[in-house]
Amino acid sequence: MGGTVRQATTRVSNDMIQGITTSGNTIMNPNNNRASLSLQNVGTKKVFIRFNTAVLLGASPGYSFVLSPASGTDEGDGGVLSVDNFAGKVYGMTASGASTIVATEFNH
């Protein structure tokens, strides 16, 4: 009884549009203050996502998630991934061509 209730606050710390290619890309570097992250594919190619290790296509397991392509560039209906409580590195890669993602990072 009589305890204090505190509400955790988060803020957008990084909000960017990033091209993803067959060479693979680092989407987010490690961040111990990260509360959550959100990725959306707004391009027209599938984007493979992996945590802490670069994406390896054709290997098992070579990726953690696949973001489906949008029906057209910037249509907003491409795959979305939201993850809480992960502070490590995030990688992305396409199997062919290039795509674009919106990557947002929320910090404590």
Image (cartoon, rainbow, N blue to C red):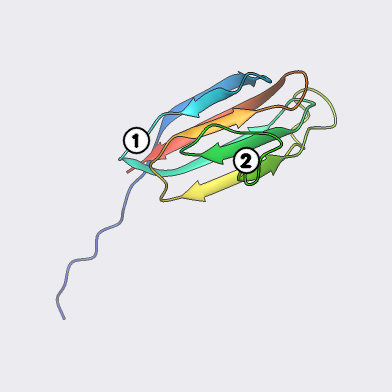
* Residue furthest left in the image: 2
Q: Position of residue 94 (x, y in %)?
A: 70, 27
Residue beneath disc 1:
31
User: Depth-wise, is mark 2 or mark 1 nearer the camera?
Assistant: 2
| Mark 2 or mark 1, earlier in chain | 1
**Kind of residue at badge 1:** Asn
Q: Position of residue 15 (x, y in %)?
A: 49, 27
Judged left or right of residue 32, residue 44 is right
User: Depth check: 11 or 57 in front?
Assistant: 57
Quadrant (top left, top right, bottom left, bottom right) of the C terminus: top left
Q: Position of residue 41 (x, y in %)?
A: 69, 32
Residue beneath disc 2:
62
Residue displayed at 69% across by 41% down: 66
Judged left or right of residue 75, residue 18 is left
- Circle 1 residues within 10 Å: few <14, some 14–19, many ≥20: few
- State the mark number for residue 94: none
Q: Quadrant of residue 75?
A: top right
* Residue furthest bottom in the image: 1
Judged left or right of residue 8, residue 59 is right
Residue displayed at 67% across by 23% down: 100
Residue displayed at 56% across by 39% down: 50
- Circle 2 residues within 10 Å: few <14, some 14–19, many ≥20: some
- Which type of secondary structure does the marked residue at label 1 adopt? loop
Q: CA distance from mark 2 to mark 1?
A: 23 Å
Rendered position, 19 above or below 6: above
Q: Quadrant of residue 57?
A: top right
Residue displayed at 49% across by 41% down: 37
Q: Position of residue 19 (x, y in %)?
A: 63, 18
Rendered position, 35 above or below 48: below
**Kind of residue at badge 2:** Gly
* Residue furthest front in the image: 59
